[in-house]
Structure formats: structure tokens, C-alpha cells
Image (cartoon, rainbow, N blue to C red):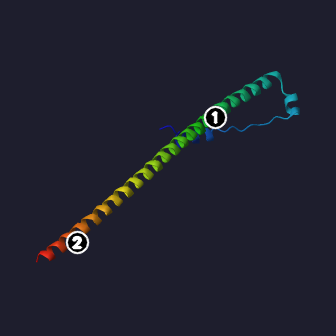
Amino acid sequence: PLLPDVEELQKARRSRIDVNILSPRTIGKMDRTSLELETQTIARQLEVLSKEKSLLISAVDRYEFELKSTAGKLQTTKSDLTHYESEASRELEKANQRCQVLREERDQAVKEAERRK
């Protein structure tokens, strides 16, 4: 189906990254190699978070699409139901009218038979 499964969303949630915020004093004490490693680490974390964000945005988009689709189907079903209800109502009215005619014909036939006796 269009919707992501729960496991897919849980994977995104589990990969949350603990970000250690470095103070300016700590950064100032770091040597060039440490700064480069820290920058690479932050870049990788940013990449992971960007992928996570994309996954979650696409999941929301799919849910919205599915919701709109379901709402459209629901509206169609309601419309069909209204149509069938009115059609059934008309058919019931016709059947009741036919029953009334048949009763009147039966009553007329009974009166006719009694008169012949």
C-alpha cells in the first residue's frame, strides 16, 4: 500500500542522534585534526537527520494522499447510499400503490362475487 509501515517509521525514530554541543571555549582548545573530525561527525549527523526528515515528510505526504483518497471514496459511497435510499423509497412507494390497487381490485371482485350469489 501507499502508507509506510510502522517499522519504517520506528527506524526513523530510533536513529535520533545525540548532539553534543561544544562550547566556544572547547572549540578554541581543539587542534585542527580534532576540529576536522568533529566537523565530519556533524556533517554525517546532518546527513542522517536530512534523510530522516525526507522519510518523515514523504510518510506525511502519503498519509495525506491516502486521507484525501479515502475521503473521496467516502463521499462517493455516501452519494451512492443516498441514491439507493431514494431509489428504494420510490420502489417501496410504487409497491405500496400496487398493493393498494390489488386490494381495491380484490375488494371489488369480492363485492362482485357477493352480488352474483
Q: Which of the two discs, 1 and 2, labels the residue nearer the N terminus?
A: 1
| 96 over 41 or under it: above or below | below
The percent position of residue 108, horizontal first and vertical second, equals 21, 70
The percent position of residue 64, horizontal first and vertical second, equals 58, 40
Which label belongs to residue 112? none
Asked whether 110 or 2 is in front, the reply is: 110
| Residue ID for mark 2 | 107
Q: Residue at x 22, y 66 (%)?
A: 105
Q: Nearer the viewer, mark 1 or mark 2?
A: 2
| 110 over 2 or under it: above or below | below
Q: Residue at x 35, y 60 (%)?
A: 93
SS state under label 2: helix
The percent position of residue 83, horizontal first and vertical second, equals 42, 50
For label 1, the crowd category at 10 Å Cα-Cα, with few meaning under 14, some 14 to 19 and many 20 or more, is: some
Q: Is residue 10 left or right of residue 37?
A: left
| 46 over 74 or under it: above or below | above
Location of the C terminus (image quadrant): bottom left
Q: Residue at x 69, y 28 (%)?
A: 44
Asked whether 114 or 27 is in front, the reply is: 114
Which label belongs to residue 52? 1
